[in-house]
Image (cartoon, helix red, strand yellow):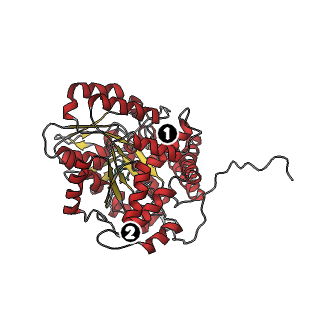
Amino acid sequence: MLAVGFRPRTIIEPFRVKVVEPLPRTTRAERAALLGRARYNLFAIRAAHVTIDLMTDSGTGAMSQEQWAAIMRGDESYAGSTSFFELEAVVRDLTGMRHVIPTHQGRAAERILFDALVGGAPGKIVPANTHFDTTRANVEAVGAEPRDLPLAEAHLPESEHPFKGNFDLVALRALLDEHAERVPAVVATVTNNSAGGQPVSLEHLRELRDLVDDYGVPLFLDCARFAENAHLVKLREPGQGERSTEEIAKEMFRLADGAWMSAKKDGLVNIGGFLALDDDALATRCRSALVLTEGFPTYGGLAGRDLAALAVGLREVLDEGYLDYRLASVRYLFEHLRERGVPLLGPPGGHAVYLDARRFLPHVPAAQLPGQSVAVALYLEAGIRTCEIGTAMFGHTLPDGTQATAPLELVRLALPRRVYTQSHVDYVAEAVGYVFERAGELGGYRIVDEPPALRHFTCGFERTGAA
Ligand code: F0G
């Protein structure tokens, strides 16, 4: 017998593989031709031509055997589906909220909620730590103004603040002091996707609760990645390490008046979402809107089997072995890239690693889309698909033809849940390192045609210089 038992430092994938899906392989010459045909827009590349797809962690995860078993048991009744009641019980237990309204994905919940909260009233303002793009668009669609009030550190890629998802509470208080009656809700996005998948601390959520109570304004969670947020709280927040992640998650929800979820992330499903509310009148308004475009309140745009898989996913996601592995895989990629000197947005968050394209390509000005250049190079060299989150996505072309640039030029490497193994991640780190060592050879891009809104999905690009 060994005197000291084995204490592994390697965090292994907490699953083994039962069904395999071949990875598409292409040659560099094929990828060069495909990029030309796609006009260098990675959204126009077919998945069959992508070897490692890090475009998003949304709806791209692998379900467990328990979820597939639940799919078989899904109850497809139009009204009163058993699968709905399974989901309702899980969401009530998690959130403490009585009304559970299923939607086909997060943005459907956003549309219904903001319509019900704002109802066409003029002059409303919705503050958030940072609105995700669809949240912003849905707030605007009902005539209200989305206002992002993140912590100052959120704009500093090199800051290692452990809770960069927090609000600037001074700015939020100032807004509420002046305009509380114009604010139908405050939104905390957990984790803060648009600011790098960074968590919001529990202490901060408690302060936020006290603050909104001073003004009688409700607090909503956009909780797409609530479990990753809760586990980052457990790992990083003083005093939280001894609690279970489930307990932390439950407290997060109990500090809010309502929540909506894109279940395609921490629901561990490929499609789904919900609204969880405690306000009877608001829930009635939301259910009426749901019936118009999503479906009857016990399925809300989903099949019974989708509801059943989500009920299982919401429990599985709080398994701390899974969450240790999940956060370790993000941290692993982050650390291997940092060792290679690759400039990153720190610290590692919950679902993705973000390259800082301004420092990656210091010779390419923001108006020449350095993030797009890095993303194209990663696809060309290694068949890896990532997503530019910078001026192509958030900038716009001014009347004189120049670019209004974004605050940050990032490239997001989002890790799908339970899909890629450590050797896939090693391959990604090697490829990014290879491109970074040769970054001086890369040039910029310009947009050659663009639609009026959400241009990054469909616009065409061309190179501004030789490379
Ligand atoms: N809220 C957050 C924080 C999100 O990240 C997303 C989606 C949504 C809401 C919208 O949910 O896609 O189910 O309608 N984020 C994806 C991404 C698309 O790639 O980060 P949805």
Q: Quadrant of residue 257?
A: top left
Say whether residue 110 is visible: yes
193 or 316: nearer the eye? 316
Vertical position of residue 167 compared to residue 416: above or below = above
In this figure, which residue is indicated by the disc labeled 1?
343
Vertical position of residue 458 compared to residue 219: above or below = below
Determine whether the beta carbon of the residue marked 1 sits less than 8 angstroms from the nearest atom of ligand 1: no
Residue sitting at the far right: 1
Residue at position x 53%, y 48% from top?
Answer: 330
Could you tell me residue 42's position as x and y percent? 36, 58
Secondary structure under tag 1 reads loop
- Among the two numbered marks 1 and 2 on one chain, the one whose residue lies closer to the N terminus: 2
Could you tell me residue 362's position as x and y percent? 42, 37
Label disc, if present, on residue 82 of the rendered structure:
2
Q: Amino acid at mark 1?
A: Pro
Residue at position x 76%, y 50% from top?
Answer: 6
